[in-house]
Image (cartoon, helix red, strand yellow):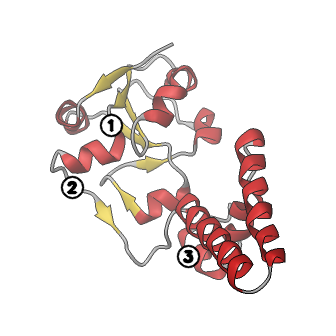
C-alpha cells in the first residue's frame, strides 16, 4: 500500500487544521531536531499509535523510511486519512518551515557510527603504512563489521555507542 505524499506546504495546512504529525525517526534524531508539535513514535512501536479519526501525517528524515513502511503506517492510522510528508524533515526545513534544534543533544547514532568507523579505518590504514602492516587488520575488522551490519540489520558499533554517557541525554536508551 502507498500513502499519498504531501508537500511541506500541504502538510503544514493539514497540521494547522488538526492533523496529527508523527515522527517515526529514532529518539536520538528527534531529540536533535524536530518539527514543533510532532509526536515521536518509533517505527517498531507504530502499532501503539492511539486511534483517532483525525488525519495523520507521518514523517522521517528524507521520506524514504516512511515510503518503505507505508503499509505499516497506513495500518497504524486505523482507517484515518494518512499521508507522508514528502521529503521528510529535510524538505520541511528547506521549505522554510520551523524546526526545533537542540545542539546540546548528541549527534544521531548512525552519524556517530559513520564518524567512528571512518576514523578507525583511517587510523588502521595510516598505522599500517607508517608503523606496521598488522594495523591493516583494524580496517578489515571495521569493514567486516559494517558488511555484517548491512546484511543483518544489527550494528554492534551502534549498540556500543548507544550506551556511551553522551547519548544518555537524548533518551536513546529505551
Relative side of 95 to 134, left or right: left
Determine the residue positioned at 53% across, 27% down: 68
Sequence-first disc among 1 and 3: 1
Whether residue 21 is situated above or below residue 173 in the rendered picture: above
User: Whole-percent x and y of residue 24?
Assistant: 50, 43
Residue 113's image quarter?
Answer: bottom right
Relative side of 78 to 91, left or right: right
The residue under label 1 is 87
- Residue extending farthest to the top is 1
Residue 16's image quarter?
Answer: top left
Choose between 49 and 70: the one closer to the eye: 70
Determine the residue positioned at 65% across, 40% down: 44
The residue under label 3 is 169
Determine the residue positioned at 50% across, 36% down: 65
Sequence-first disc among 3 and 2: 2
Q: Which mark is residue 114?
A: none
Q: Secondary structure at mark 3?
A: helix
Whether residue 69 is situated above or below residue 151 in the rendered picture: above
Kindly report the distance in space between the C-alpha atoms of the residues bearing marks 3 and 2.
23 Å
User: Whole-percent x and y of residue 127?
Assistant: 70, 81
Kindly report the distance in space between the C-alpha atoms of the residues bearing marks 1 and 3.
28 Å
Q: Are marks 1 and 3 in contact (CB under 8 Å)?
A: no
Determine the residue positioned at 42% across, 78% down: 104
Residue 138's image quarter?
Answer: bottom right
Q: Secondary structure at mark 2?
A: loop
The residue under label 2 is 98
Relative side of 66 to 122, left or right: left
Sequence-first disc among 1 and 2: 1
Amino acid at each position: 500500500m502507498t500513502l499519498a505524499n504531501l508537500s511541506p506546504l500541504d502538510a503544514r495546512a493539514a497540521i494547522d487544521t488538526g492533523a496529527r504529525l508523527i515522527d517515526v525517526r529514532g529518539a536520538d534524531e528527534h531529540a536533535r531536531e524536530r518539527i514543533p508539535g510532532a509526536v515521536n513514535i518509533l517505527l517498531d512501536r507504530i502499532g501503539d499509535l492511539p486511534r483517532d479519526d483525525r488525519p495523520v501525517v507521518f514523517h522521517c528524515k528524507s521520506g524514504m523510511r516512511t515510503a518503505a513502511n507505508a503499509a505499516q503506517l497506513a495500518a497504524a492510522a486505523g482507517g484515518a486519512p494518512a499521508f507522508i510528508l514528502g521529503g521528510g524533515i529535510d524538505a520541511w526545513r528547506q521549505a522554510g518551515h520551523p524546526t526545533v534544534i537542540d545542539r546540546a543533544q548528541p549527534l544521531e547514532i548512525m552519524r556517530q557510527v559513520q564518524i567512528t568507523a571512518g576514523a578507525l579505518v583511517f587510523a588502521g590504514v595510516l598505522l599500517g603504512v607508517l608503523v606496521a602492516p598488522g594495523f591493516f587488520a583494524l580496517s578489515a575488522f571495521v569493514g567486516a563489521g559494517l558488511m555484517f551490519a548491512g546484511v543483518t540489520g544489527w550494528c554492534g558499533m551502534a549498540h556500543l555507542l548507544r550506551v556511551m554517557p553522551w547519548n544518555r541525554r537524548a533518551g536513546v536508551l529505551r
